Image (cartoon, helix red, strand yellow):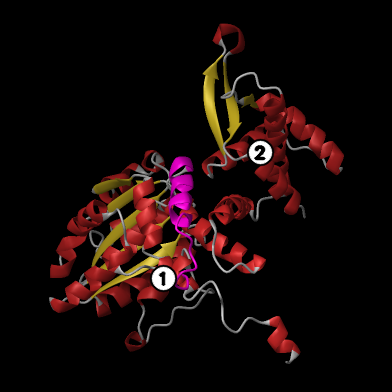
Amino acid sequence: MSQSDDLFIREDPIFVNKELLEISHLPDEGRIVGRDEEIGQLANAVNPAIFGQSPSNVLIYGKTGTGKSLCAKYVSRRLVSTAEEEGVNAVFAYVDCAQDTTETQTAQTIASAVNTDETDIYIPDKGISTATYYKRLWRILDKEYDVALIILDEIDKLEDDAILMQLSRAGEAGKVTNCKIGVIGISNKIKYKDRMDERVKSSLCEREFVFPPYNASQLNEIMAARNDAFRDGVLEEGVIPRAAALAAREHGDARKAIDILRYAGEIAQAKGADTVREEFVVQARERAEVDRFRELIRGSTPHSRYALQALTVLSLEDREEPIDENEGFRTTRVYDVYEQICRQEGTDALSLRRVRDLLKEHAFLDVIEQSRHSGGSAEGSYTEHTLLEDPEVVKDVLADTVD
């Protein structure tokens, strides 16, 4: 047997189609579970598009892993095919605003997604102005399509509302004359609309939907619909119910639930086990939490991590001597520990105001929770910060992400 045969597994004993357990995988219609009502509402909002009319602009809210992006892509894909049957040329473009945060990046991504070989219009990755990207986008849309749906996922990550203003008012401003444009904005932040420009809000927020977390029964069904990712007989009977119960109790997040199931299979694989056992689910849940949090703070600056480390230190100390389980820590107390960490790292501390901003950024990512309190006339108001993640997990991840 060659060294190559020793190194690689030619036939996976656990998985047969692991792609079904990837978050990026868009399931078939039968695999979308627990979202019939939401899919129906969204389809109703964009339904005029199949007749070449203007679809409603939509904002979808909900926690991570509640099926927002999944349903938006599914409805958009179905709309394109249904419109074709009606003789209407429709298209949809998907933008991940966590990646494309600027107006220029978003305009380029949309233009590139809707472009075709027939237009003879060139959309470079970079090197032209934002205005030129828009001009080429409008030309493509008017030349090729009757209707375009633009999905802006994690819309709250956009630097400003400029792209929203352009898209929502393109027809009114005469920038497109033949193509009707609809926008589907997706956000984890229920209060995102509050910070929108009033002009954008009036034209963009025609319909709003909130996606609730999945319950244990729905999560069980979601994972059961993907069990053909595994070889026959590999999953022990209690694995999916246990993973569903854990996920429902903690967050109702389908992404995390699917992650747990995939990791349980990988743990079985690593251990050389013939089956995926229930005991692997608990280990998989811990690994999923660590990986999710590592992804959240990836790319953060050293001082952003120091501020988070300071809150973690306080949380761990409070765990040893609990006074109030829900107690948070004032900004000044977090800052004192932050300064100590900076001294240990041999770096100058940032100002209290800047650290307050860093803590706000962590709150925006749902890593911590902030609450305002009144100390009366003597103290005035102040902010308390509470770590939402397990402090042990945060401690381990921060240790792994040191520059």
Q: Is 110 above or below relative to 117?
A: above
Q: Is residue 359 left or right of residue 336?
A: left
Disc 1 crowd rating (10 Å Cα; few below 14, some 14-19, many 20+) is some
Q: Is 6 above or below relative to 107?
A: below
Q: Return the disc, 1 or 2, that comes first in the chain's sequence.
A: 1
- The mark closer to the camera, 1 or 2, is 1
**Quadrant location of the C terminus?**
bottom right
The answer to whether residue 204 shows anywhere in this view is yes
Point out which mark residue 163 bears: none
The CA span between labels 1 and 2 is: 36 Å
Q: Nearer the viewer, residue 278 or 89?
A: 278
The boundaries of the magenta stretch are 230-250
Q: Residue at x 56, y 60 (%)?
A: 264
Point out which mark residue 228 bears: 1
Image quarter of residue 134:
bottom left
The amino acid type of the residue labelled 1 equals Asp
Q: Is 133 above or below relative to 357?
A: below
The answer to whether residue 101 shows anywhere in this view is no
The residue tagged 2 is 391
Q: Residue at x 60, y 84 (%)?
A: 10
Q: Residue furthest bottom?
A: 1
Q: Report x, y in % for residue 283.
A: 61, 52
Q: Report x, y in % for residue 321.
A: 71, 22
Q: Is residue 370 left or right of residue 106?
A: right
Q: Secondary structure at mark 2?
A: helix
Disc 2 crowd rating (10 Å Cα; few below 14, some 14-19, many 20+) is some
Q: Secondary structure at mark 1?
A: helix
**Quadrant location of the N terminus?**
bottom right
The amino acid type of the residue labelled 2 equals Pro
Q: Residue at x 66, y 44 (%)?
A: 393
